Image (cartoon, rainbow, N blue to C red):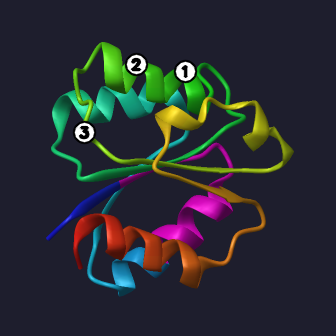
Amino acid sequence: MNTILIVDDEYLIVEILAYALEDEGFAVEKAGDGTKALETLKQKRVDLVITDFMMPKKNGEELAREIRDELELADLPVILMSGAQASQASPDLFVAVFEKPFNPIELIAKVRELLGG
């Protein structure tokens, strides 16, 4: 079973997305900011990260850079979900970008494509 880490400071978005992904057979880990996400990644094996851009402590771009540089997880797919800030992020850090409000069906299809499911 593939594990997905959802990183967002908006509780309802995390819960709705987690429910949808679990319903599709994925295991889900949750973090409310980039710092907590990095702690989770050091402790658990994760197959994909879905992160917001604007968050306290570390934004989605800072999180993606640390995943690549510090945790040496260059091949870990990271999806960015964001509002208008998505255009500010470095596109080379993310395998896909979904603007909020996003379509959960399209996001799940992308997750399945990336994880070979």
Image depth: mark 1 or mark 3 in front: 3
Instruction: Identify the image quadrant of residue 23.
Output: bottom left
Residue kind at label 1, given as amino acid type: Glu
- Was residue 14 drawn as part of the magenta stretch in this picture? yes
For the residues labelled 1 and 3, the Cα–Cα distance comes to 17 Å
> In what element is the residue under mark 3?
loop
- Magenta stretch, main secondary structure, is helix
The residue singled out by tag 3 in the image is 75
The residue singled out by tag 2 in the image is 66
Residue 38 located left or right of residue 87: left
Disc 2 residue crowd, few under 14, some 14–19, many 20+, Cα 10 Å: some
Q: How many labels does the image show?
A: 3
Q: Quadrant of the C terminus?
A: bottom left
Residue kind at label 3, given as amino acid type: Asp
Q: Which residue is drawn at 30% across and 35% down?
A: 40
Pinpoint residue 85: horizontal percent, then vertical percent. 80, 38
Disc 1 residue crowd, few under 14, some 14–19, many 20+, Cα 10 Å: some
74 is higher (above) or lower (below) than 23: above
Mark 1 vs 2: CB contact within 8 A = yes
Pinpoint residue 13: horizontal percent, then vertical percent. 64, 62
Using the image as rendered, state which of residue 23 and residue 75 is in the foreground. 75
Residue 112 located left or right of residue 88: left
Q: Residue at x 45, y 21 (%)?
A: 65
Q: Which residue is drawn at 78% across and 67% down?
A: 101
Label 2 vs 3, first from the N-terminus: 2
> In what element is the residue under mark 2?
helix
Q: What stretch is highlighted in magenta?
A: 5-19
The residue singled out by tag 1 in the image is 62
Pinpoint residue 105: horizontal percent, then vertical percent. 56, 84
